[in-house]
Image: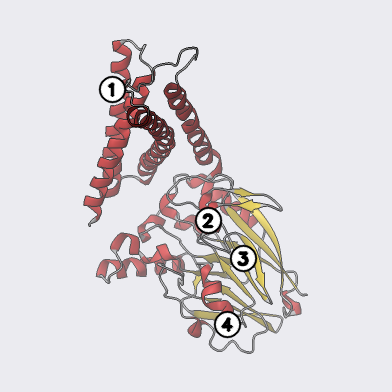
Amino acid sequence: MGRLPLLVLLTFILLALDYYCYKAVLSVFKKWTNNTRRLFTTLWWGYTILLTIGVFTSIYLNLFLSLRAVILVAYFLTVTCKMVFLVFLLADDIRRLGILVYRKYIKKETPPVSPAKVPGEPISRSEFLVKTGMLVAAIPLTSLSWGIISGAYDYRIKRVKLVLPNLPKAFDGMTLAQISDVHSGSFYNKKAVNGGIDMLLGEKPDMIFFTGDLVNDKASEMRNYQDIFARLKAPLGVYSTLGNHDYGEYFYGKGPSAAKAQNLADVIATHKNMGWDLLMNENRRIKVDGEEIGVLGVENWGMGRFPKFGRMEEAIKNTDDLPVKLLLSHDPSHWRGEVLEKYPQIDAMFSGHTHGMQFGVRLKDVQWSPVQYIYPEWAGLYQKQQQQLYVNVGYGFLGYPGRVGMLPEITIFELKRA
């Protein structure tokens, strides 16, 4: 099924569920006047129809990114709240169906089942469930709205001491910054994005890593942000790699095409234009005071459905003499999927990809997110024997244009000898 038929089918399903919610609301506000009911109906369906048209327009027309973001945010919040509401409506209908079946087939009675009040009760069970559902549905609306207003650009610096037993003395105490998952196509606040770069530069890192997903789909998404990220400079260089979104597969499809190839070439050129050293299954030798370490970078390699373009056998070439090897690889599943088993010489790997699902709890000693049920390593520092992995939860956002609990991250590592 193509994208348009699938979207049309999904729209009809959501409109049917919307009608279900609409009728439930009317059923518990029977005292409304005709004018109030007409006004409610006009607002409910007017908003729904305009929002649906807006979604199709934002997908198929080249709207301003800010307008597209507003439309998709409104749609996301609306659908989320109504889905929560539906849980309570279905619970009420199942309850009433159970009563009907019991009376008709077990007690052999046929009184009508209705949401009328039970004698002595101030409110019927049906009315209670519907109104409770409306109240509970407001909770995700409130929290997700706050995540957009407050969380999307609330950059936080995470400080990590990275102990590397074989680290040369010349590198002891140096600082390394990491950002990941910019997703520039989702941004709508250039001033805030620029403020995050100011925070990073204020740390004066010796070296900077970017671990993939510069864009959502197309290289053109960086047009308004290239100058901002080009400000990233460090004495020992800025090194980057590609993520699964950088290949354009979610826009152009998995098969080869001239447009898709040109888009990838444009993404690669953007890294170069910003002064970033993009590592495409290759390595660099970083030299300080006659001592060296290696920085390796692979193209995206992920478990499951994600692309496996990474070629570790290429990236590791001519690095046997280096005492420390730092690997940039976008997807943390690469660590378990290949690095731990086949490449024990990798001392530390730096990843992103998970975003911490942009939702969860992240405190000093406790962290939780639904994404942990998908990725064993999803945020922070992990170690297995002598190999380490750090997963950055991302600088930007995708889909939901905000963050709740999992705030955008700038990681500052202090390199230390054992």
> Looking at the image, how many numbered discs can be counted on the residues?
4
For residue 371, the mark is 2
Looking at the rendered image, the disc whose residue lies closer to the viewer, 3 or 1, is 1
Disc 2 element: helix
Q: Position of residue 225 (x, y in %)?
A: 45, 54
Query: Separation of disc 1 and disc 2 at Cα?
Result: 39 Å
Identify which residue, 196 or 101, lies in the foreground.
Answer: 101
Colour scheme employed for the rendering of this structure:
secondary structure
Residue wearing tag 4: 343
For residue 332, the mark is none
Q: Is residue 170 visible?
A: yes
The C terminus is located in which quarter?
A: bottom right
Looking at the rendered image, the disc whose residue lies closer to the viewer, 2 or 3, is 2
In the rendered structure, which disc, 3 or 1, sits on the residue that comes first in sequence? 1
Pointers 4 and 2 in contact (CB under 8 A)? no
Q: Position of residue 417 (x, y in %)?
A: 76, 74
Q: Position of residue 138 (x, y in %)?
A: 48, 31
Q: Dot 2, how many residues are within 10 Å of its Cα: few (below 14), some (14-19), or many (20+)?
A: some
Amino acid at the residue labelled 4: Tyr
Residue wearing tag 3: 390
